């Protein structure tokens, strides 16, 4: 069995402060590294998010164009129906007018 020699080491307060300062410096360096890594990761996530947002905006623009074209088609169909309905009304009025003229001429 080896004998362990005990030595008393005397440290001054300034030595303790210096050691603590060095330890604090190491911890600060580690913290700076972690902050830089986190910033890099956040930057990558932001880039991906921006790319996805651009794609989404592009898809939304395409959908808006499709909706506009569909609305134009609906308006055109409505106009066609209104025009057809007007022709039907004119035809009905004309038929009634002819029928009244025939009745008038028969009764005369």
Image: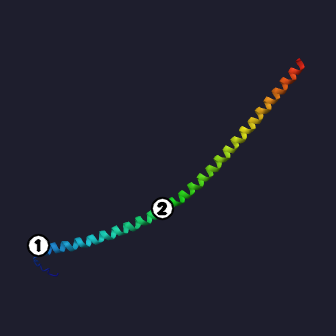
Mark 1 or 2: in front is 2
Residue 86 point in image, percent of width and height: 74, 35
**Up/down of 6 relative to 60, above or below:** below
Q: How is the protein colored in the picture?
A: rainbow
Q: Is residue 11 left or right of residue 101?
A: left
The residue at the point 26 percent across, 73 percent down is 26
Residue 21 point in image, percent of width and height: 19, 72
Query: As rendered, which of 2 and 35 lies closer to the eye?
Result: 35
Q: Pointer 2: what residue?
A: 50
Q: Identify the residue at the far top of this view.
A: 107
Query: As rendered, which of 22 and 6 lies closer to the eye?
Result: 22
The residue at the point 69 percent across, 44 percent down is 76
Of callouts 1 and 2, which one flags the residue occurring earlier in the amino acid sequence? 1
Residue 46 point in image, percent of width and height: 44, 63
Element at badge 1? helix
Which class describes the residues within 10 Å of circle 1: few (<14), some (14-19), or many (20+)?
Answer: few
Q: Identify the residue at the far front of this view.
A: 108
Q: Pointer 1: what residue?
A: 13
Name the quarter where the C terminus is drawn: top right
The residue at the point 14 percent across, 75 percent down is 15
Name the quarter where the N terminus is drawn: bottom left
Element at badge 2? helix
Label 1, label 2: how many angstroms apart (C-alpha)?
54 Å
Q: Residue 88 occupies which quadrant of the picture? A: top right
Which class describes the residues within 10 Å of circle 2: few (<14), some (14-19), or many (20+)?
Answer: few
Query: As rendered, which of 58 and 26 lies closer to the eye?
Result: 58
């Amino acid at each position: 069995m080896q004998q362990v020699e005990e030595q008393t080491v005397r440290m001054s307060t300034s030595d303790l402060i210096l050691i603590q300062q060095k330890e604090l410096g190491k911890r600060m360096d580690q913290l700076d590294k972690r902050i830089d890594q986190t910033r890099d990761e956040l930057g990558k996530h932001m880039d991906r998010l921006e790319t996805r947002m651009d794609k989404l905006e592009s898809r939304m623009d395409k959908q808006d164009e499709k909706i506009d074209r569909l609305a134009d088609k609906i308006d055109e169909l409505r106009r066609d129906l209104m025009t057809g309905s007007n022709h039907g009304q004119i035809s009905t009025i004309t038929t009634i007018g002819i029928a009244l003229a025939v009745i008038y001429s028969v009764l005369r």
